[in-house]
Every structure is written in structure tokens, then in C-alpha cells.
Image (tube, rainbow, N blue to C red):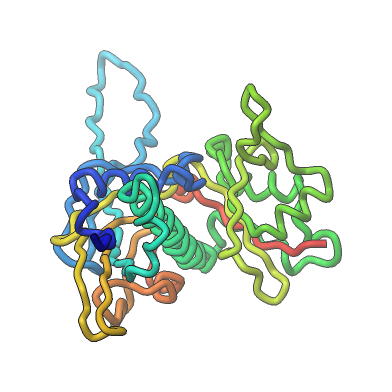
Amino acid sequence: MVDTPTKVSDIIVPEIYLPAMQEATTRSNAFFQSGVVQTVDDLTFPDQGGKLVEMPFFKALGERAQLLDDTQDLEIKKIEMGQDTAVLHARALVYGASDLSSALNSRDPMLAIANGVGENWSYEFNMVLISTIKGAMNALAAESPAANTLDISGLSGAAAYIDGEAFIDAGQTMGDAKSRIVACAMHSATEAYLQKNDLIAEVRDSDGVWLYNTFQQKRVIVDDALAPSNGIYETYLFGPGAIGYDDGAPKVPFEEGRDPLIGGGQDYIVSRRHFVLHPRGIRWTPQSGDPAKLTPTDAELEIAGNWTRAYQTKNIRIVRMRHKLG
């Protein structure tokens, strides 16, 4: 009897696969695990990517208390609403049967595929997130004076290098809200430089297993998508929930099929996701012509002109630091 090769359609149960894949996306993602990315509840998603997702918010109540006086009525103050706006991302991952061969032959092929696809989505989310914060923070840096930005890259000699004092100065751009900072994202070369200067500490569990590194008691997230330009590096400081996230519901989030025209026929699967990854307090306000297609590219996300500040600066839980390495 001839063995019939296992097909994706034989082992995928969408009701089980999709939650497992989504969980795998965030399980090992440092932006999610550190609390930098947090889910925003009750978002209303449009049907197509590239569309706007409205995120209304209550403006900060900055009024002082009124003095009680029998001869004067109290004044009723208004609670004002503001409008933050995100963009809906619509993206897909496609895999041929050869890409899935090892997963199909594993003990639990459905879980193996869910984990593999989820990990690829985790990488994709990071790329979208980093392009987003580059563009959004470029917009804040263009304000006069620059908001939530410390740029020491133009200073002479060691004054341009990242160190503990410069990191504290970066946090100070948030004023008394600096205590909210919980994590920082940097290039691996920046982390290595700080390690050489004994500025990186390790956090381990009770069994001595390494969990993550810290700098100035803030969790370090390392991603080489934060590549330097002309020797200038960017390191980002984050408060909890600095990035708002939610998953939408594409009409067909998962499907498998067969293309008879490729190599005599090839099985494939498609994983589609609609999602929001938005820097809270910095509105997506695209210029004319952006996005050029249905959903924005990474390059379009990095354009400062596509973003406008909506929150007071200290309520934006992101700071950009530009620096060099010694």
C-alpha cells in the first residue's frame, strides 16, 4: 500500500489553529512581553486595509480645584474629547508545501505550523512597529522645539556616545512622566557597546535561567531593524502601552489550495491578518497619495509627514534618542 503524503487540509482545524497561531505571535515577542504593546479594546475595524481606525480619548484634566465660597457658585468645567487615528494594516504570508515539509512530518503538525507562522508574524509585527515609530517620532522631532527627542549625535567626541547620563537625559524629555518608562529598544551593536562598559544587567528567574537584559533598570529589546545611518544609532524608550494593538478579522484569515501551474502543481497556505499597531497619541494623517496601494508600506510608515501629534508630549510614552557608539 502506497503512503499518501500528509496535506495541510488533512490536519488544520481553523478554530484551533488560528488562536494557536495568534498566541505564538506574541508569546516570544519582547515588545508584547514587556508591555510596550498592549491591546486596545473596542476598536471598530473597517473592511479593508489602509483605512483609518478612530481612537477617541479624553483629554487630560488639568484644572486645579476650586475654592469653596458661600458667595460664589462653582464653575462647571467641560471634559473635552480628542481624536487619535490609526491605520489598518492588511498583510499576508504565503507558504508552499516545501516550506512546511518539516512541520507536516512533526508529532503535532498543526501546532508546528501555527508556531512557525506565528513566529513569522511576530517578525512582521516588529518590522511594522519599527517603521511606524521611526515615522511618528520623526514628526515629533520636526516640532519646534523637538518633542520627546534627545539628539546627542552631533556633539563632539564622547559626548555623542550613549551612556547612563545620556539615557537619563532622554527620559527627562518626558518631564515628571519619565517614571513610566519600562523598556528600551536598541540595535545589537548598541547593547554590545553598553555591555563592554558594564552598563547592562541580567534578569534571571529563581532557577538562574536568563530572562532578559536591562539598562538603567529598563528592559532591553534588541532588534537590528534599528540599523544605524552614517554611524548614528537610534534607541527608543517606551512606557507601558506606548503602542496600541488589536487584531481585525479578514474575510478569509486562513486558506489552503493548490496551484497546478507551478512545478507540476504545488500546495500552499495563505495566512492573512488585519491589525493595528499604533503609537498612542500620534495620529496617522497621510499625505495625498499615501498609501499608494490598499495598505501602507514600511517606507510610507517612515514618512514624518504622515503623522501628527494628538496628545500632550508627556502623555506620549515614547522617546527617541539619537547617538553614536565609542
- List the single residue furthest toward the top: 70
Along the horizontal axis of the image, is 290 left or right of 231? Answer: left
Q: Is residue 177 visible?
A: yes
Along the horizontal axis of the image, is 208 left or right of 89? Answer: right
| Residue at the (72%, 66%) spot, across then down | 153
Image spot of residue 224 (x, y percent)? 60, 63
Q: Is 206 above or below relative to 26?
A: above
| Residue at the (42%, 72%) spot, across then down | 298
Where residue 264 sits, quadrant-wise, is bottom left
How many marks the image carries: the answer is 0
Nearest to the observer: residue 80 or residue 125: 125
Q: Is 177 above or below relative to 82?
A: above
Image spot of residue 152 (x, y percent)? 72, 62
Location of the N terminus by quadrant is bottom left
| Residue at the (46%, 71%) spot, across then down | 302
Q: Is 76 above or below relative to 200?
A: above
Nearest to the observer: residue 313 or residue 295: 295
Q: Is residue 88 visible?
A: no
| Residue at the (60%, 41%) spot, across then down | 219
Image spot of residue 68 (x, y percent)? 32, 16
Along the horizontal axis of the image, is 178 left or right of 139? Answer: right
Q: Is 57 above or below relative to 285?
A: above
